[in-house]
Amino acid sequence: MEKKQYIYSVNLFISIIYLISIILLLFIEGKLFYPKSYSLKFFLIGIIAIIINSSLFIFERLKLHKKIRLFSIKFNLIEAFLIFILIISLSALGGMIYSDNFLLKKESNNEWSIGIYLSESKIPINFSDEHLNNPVLTRLNIFDTKALFIADPFLIYENNMFYMFFEIDSATTFKGSIGLAESSNGFNWTYKQIVLDEPFHLSYPCVFKYNNTYYMIPESAEVKSIRLYKALDFPYNWVFIKTLIAGGDFVDNTIFYFNDTWWLFTEKLNKASLYLYYSDSPFGPWIEHPKNPIVYKDLNISRPGGNVIVFDNEIIRYAQDDYLSYGNQIWAFEITKLSKNEYQEKRIDDKPILKGYDNWNKLGVHQISICRIDNKWIAAVDGDGKP
């Protein structure tokens, strides 16, 4: 093997090991199926390095063949393997460009934003945004960081004011933080600021009230734990209280209170399964439900899609549908039996309660957060499209 071929082969081997390590790291961290933009950049670096080095190695071997006019089985097998690697790498690169518009992406394309929906039905379904001007918030409203998108809204109605907590995915830090917007009527919103930021990614800010104090359980799967925060001066000044559950890639953690018990849904990401925990207090200790997993390996309904609604002794769970694509619609389930030993639910309708139809969310929706005001339901919904 000539010196150039040796250098190219070493670089190719390093590039392949690098790409495999990125894939393993994402799998361990529970991000393999939902990589963020910075993960895609690392993928891109590895794939380009493989393409360059395999192309150079093949070129040098073809020069060698021409020089010595020798085509042995050994040489042909090596070249066939390298050509195979080159084709796979080019296909992966093309797939990244096509699916994520990675290289040609404009900031206004395919981004999540937030809209408002209403329903006058007895149970919180049949939502519509007719006569409403959606989206009510986009990344362009964010002024304290350069936002790639906003998503995962949670609504709170307190003292005749609406408060919306949501994820802000930053192009500066390549991670999510929790932002706040306020409204006096639920339709016209003013962005305030980032209210919770950590060195790791945060999203899905599930906010709830306990003993006249507001708490938040955001998604913090990056540190493999479910963490509890408290508002010292609601809706501002959130501080970390304690880790509720540790040791897993928990996503979209959703807490609610029913029958003198606190309940907590979470999806274990790489298992694509829904798990349920219960406790006498939101501070724990949290006990795993004996019926776990509640939903087993079903991307259509396993991931929580917003706050659980408890009213008139009925319980409604919302699930985001991540099959075949991430966050394309939302299903509603009535929990018909819930105790520390039993769990049963049924799908409310054979159609999703929300699916992207309008220009601002035509590529999908994956979360709904609902408040009951008088005889109406008002919901904050995120959507993917071109606002």
Image: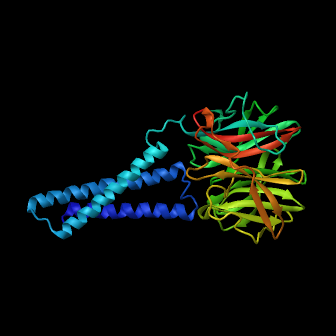
Task: From this view, report whether residue 26 is shown above or below residue 366.
Answer: below
> Which quadrant of the figure has residue 342?
bottom right
Q: Is 131 drawn above or below residue 153 in the view shown? A: above
Nearer to me, 206 or 202: 206
Residue at the image position 72 percent from the left and 33 percent from the top: 129
Q: Residue 173: percent from the left, percent from the top?
A: 57, 47
Q: Is residue 310 left or right of residue 141?
A: right
| Residue 75 rendering spot, x and y as whole percentages | 19, 66
Residue at 70% x, 28% y is 133
**Residue 184, percent across and down?**
82, 32
Compared across the picture, whether 30 is left or right of 307 comes to: left
* Residue drawn at 61 percent across, 45 percent down: 169
* Residue 190: quadrant of the picture: top right
The quadrant the C terminus occupies is: top right
In the depicted view, which residue is nearer to us: 333 or 99? 333
Q: Nearer the viewer, residue 141 or 111?
A: 111
Q: Residue furthest front?
A: 350
Residue 266, position in %: x, y?
70, 60
| Picture quadrant where residue 279 is located | bottom right
Q: Residue at x 17, y 57 (%)?
A: 62
Give the quadrant of the N terminus: bottom left
Mark yes or no: residue 145 visible. no
